[in-house]
Amino acid sequence: MLLDSASLYFRAYYGVPDTLKGPNGAPNNAIRGFLDMIARLVSDRRPDGLVACLDYDWRPAFRVEAIPSYKAHRVAEDGSDGAEEVPDDLSPQVPVIIETLAALGICTVGVEGFEADDVIGTLAQTLPGPIEAVTGDRDLFQLVDDDRGVRVVYTARGMSNLEVLTNPDLVAKYGVRGDQYVDFAVMRGDPSDGLPGVPGIGEKTAARLIEAYGDLAAIRAAAADPADKGPLKPKQRENLIASSDYLDVANRVVEVRGDLTIDIDPTLPTKPADPEALGVLGRTWGIESSLRRIADALQHGPSDRPPTQSGPI
């Protein structure tokens, strides 16, 4: 199981009341929510390996160079160094989350210059399957591979209503398979990532064009071919040609990297790596109940762990 950590702790921050505070007086909602997510995922999904994947660069230079608008709206107003806009109450909780994972013995990994998506993409290709990537980010749908057993556990509808997506699910939902998703996403665009897409081509049109032509390269070739008799409409042809500069580079931005050098042991621990440190963290941040839940989930092996239910966060 590969966790898109930032996606999950942002969801925890907004999903758990910020009135929850530890004995130190600091909010602990993201920490508690994130740990409760892991406890529930481990209990319900029963992985034998778990990796919390981290953004070591949330806006990598190679993506910004290709498309300068990439995530530009998320840059903090005073972030001259390109810092991401993060809620004030969340920022101090993130290092505690990472410290707690280390004390638990849960593998964490990030790679300088890359996003967690790229770490997940690499591990999805190099670790033996089956593999589940847990995220609220649609970009990771491109990793779905039924032959290798790579699925996405999609959290957008909450932990009580997870969607486990395979290729038939993606086709039913969007009309494309995982291996077609990058071309689909490039044409559709994504305002939340600063990707303009092709004007006049939304999800349904992008899916229809991919079904008709096979991939984006063939669609672009057809748009430039006056003799093409396919389903492209005149305005769509015009917009595809006008978007050539964007389409030339967009795949480099949307496509998740799978070629990073990563050497880890993803084995799920059955007991905390540092109980003393964990005790200090629990008392300081008031997260003892969450730590008990996750410790209970971890101490059962993947084959004998009884199915349990935990409440929604």
Image (tube, rainbow, N blue to C red):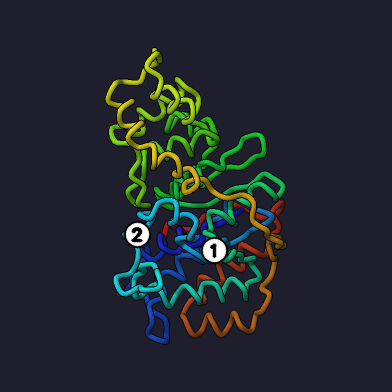
- In depth, the one of 263 and 147 nearer the eye is 263
| Secondary structure beneath label 2 | helix
Image quadrant where one finds the C terminus: bottom left
- In depth, the one of 24 and 256 nearer the eye is 256
* Residue 72 numbered tag: 2
Q: Write the residue at 36% across / 75% down.
A: 89
* Residue 113 numbered tag: 1
| Secondary structure beneath label 1 | loop
> Is 263 displayed left or right of 87 in the figure?
right
Q: Is residue 107 above or below residue 145?
A: below
Q: How many marks?
A: 2
Give the amino acid at mark 2: Ala
Q: Is there a contact, CB below 8 Å, between mark 1 and mark 2?
A: no
Label 2: how many Cα within 10 Å (few below 14, some 14–19, many 20+): some
- In depth, the one of 275 and 55 nearer the eye is 55
Give the amino acid at mark 1: Gly
Residue 143: % across, % down: 56, 43
Q: Is residue 93 above or below residue 69?
A: below
Query: Mark 1 and mark 2: span between their CA atoms?
Result: 17 Å
Residue 114: % across, % down: 54, 60
* Residue 41 numbered tag: none
Res 238 → quadrant: top left
Residue 9: % across, % down: 45, 64
Residue 32: % across, % down: 46, 70
- In depth, the one of 116 and 186 nearer the eye is 186
Q: Write the residue at 53% across / 66% down.
A: 56
Label located before the other in sequence (1 or 2): 2
Q: Write the residue at 43% across / 46% down.
A: 161
